């Protein structure tokens, strides 16, 4: 089955700096890669996603890049703000696995004011 | 529009006790999922229901059972709780017509003593 690894497990950045989280996946048939943000005491919320026919997608301060050849994808947050502090999860899914999401282990991001 | 509703939010059980975690969605989604979240291990799939009337095992099904009561409701049962089942449980739903994005509930924090 699919295996998703996520790094780093914790990330501390100064407000205004950029944050980058990286994930690798094992199943070359995976074709959908979402990112979720989880705030304390809440369920994960989808913040951005990318499909395999696209190499990069941007939404305001967040962007995701995908390298299908290397089987890795990354989340970039620019101009970080204290409200960006949360746990972020990457995930991968493909039709071969019934479109079920496999999640990475999560990255705890702390933005210091 | 409530999205995905989970009850209860918190529960403490003694080893050997049974309980059912309830999940309901009001988005007319076809697929529903149960995940558990443990520190440093991300989200792991316990069981899922691709459509009303079907259920399948995920990555960590041992010690659990599920029921897809109708299109809206998907319950998770612990027949004989064990301390290893102490975790935060999340229910999620998805509609194929909207792509692969999951909507998560706010979680049930379960402690087994």
Image (spheres, rainbow, N blue to C red):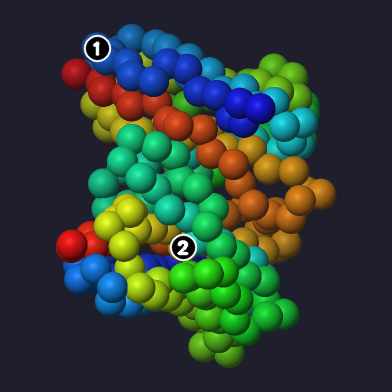
Residue that numbered label 2 is attached to: A90
Q: Residues within 10 Å of mark 1 (few under 14, many from 20)?
A: few
Residue depicted at 62% across the width and 84% down the height: A55
What numbered label is drawn on residue A40? none
Taking the image as shown, residue A39 lies to the left or right of residue A4, namely left
Residue depicted at 33% across the width and 10% down the height: B17
Q: CA distance from mark 1 to mark 2?
A: 34 Å
Q: Position of residue A90 (x, y in %)?
A: 46, 63
Subunit of label 2: A
Residue that numbered label 1 is attached to: B14
- Whether B58 is drawn above or below B79: the answer is below
Residue depicted at 59% across the width and 41% down the height: B103
Which residue sits furthest right?
B97
Residue depicted at 47% across the width and 17% down the height: B7
The N terminus of chain B - image quarter:
top right
Q: Position of residue A17 (x, y in %)?
A: 28, 76
**Quadrant assignment, res A22:** bottom left
Residue A46 visible in this rendered orientation of the protein: yes
**Quadrant assignment, res A88:** bottom left
Residue A26 visible in this rendered orientation of the protein: no
Q: Position of residue A102 (x, y in %)?
A: 52, 57
* Comparing labels 1 and 2, the label whose residue is closer to the camera: 2
- Whether B15 is drawn above or below B3: the answer is above
- Whether B46 is drawn above or below B74: the answer is below
């Amino acid at each position: 089955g699919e295996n998703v690894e996520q790094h780093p497990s914790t990330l501390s950045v100064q407000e205004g700096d950029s944050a980058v989280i990286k994930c690798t996946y094992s199943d070359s048939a995976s074709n959908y890669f979402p990112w979720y943000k989880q705030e304390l005491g809440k369920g994960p919320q989808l913040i951005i996603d990318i499909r395999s026919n696209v190499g990069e997608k941007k939404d305001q301060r967040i962007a995701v890049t995908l390298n299908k050849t290397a089987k890795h994808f990354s989340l970039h947050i620019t101009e970080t703000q204290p409200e960006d502090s949360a746990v972020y999860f990457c995930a991968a899914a493909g039709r071969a696995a019934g479109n079920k999401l496999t999640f990475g282990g999560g990255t705890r991001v702390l933005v210091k004011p | 529009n409530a999205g995905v509703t989970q009850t209860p939010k918190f529960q403490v059980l003694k080893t050997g006790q049974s309980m059912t975690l309830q999940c309901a969605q009001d988005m007319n989604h076809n697929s529903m999922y149960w995940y558990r979240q443990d520190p440093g291990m991300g989200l792991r799939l316990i069981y899922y229901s691709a459509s009303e009337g079907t259920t399948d095992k995920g990555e960590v099904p041992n010690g659990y059972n599920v029921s897809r009561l109708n299109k809206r409701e998907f319950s998770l049962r612990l027949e004989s709780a064990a301390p290893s089942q102490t975790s935060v449980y999340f229910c999620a739903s998805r509609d194929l017509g909207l792509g692969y994005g999951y909507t998560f509930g706010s979680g049930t924090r379960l402690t087994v003593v």
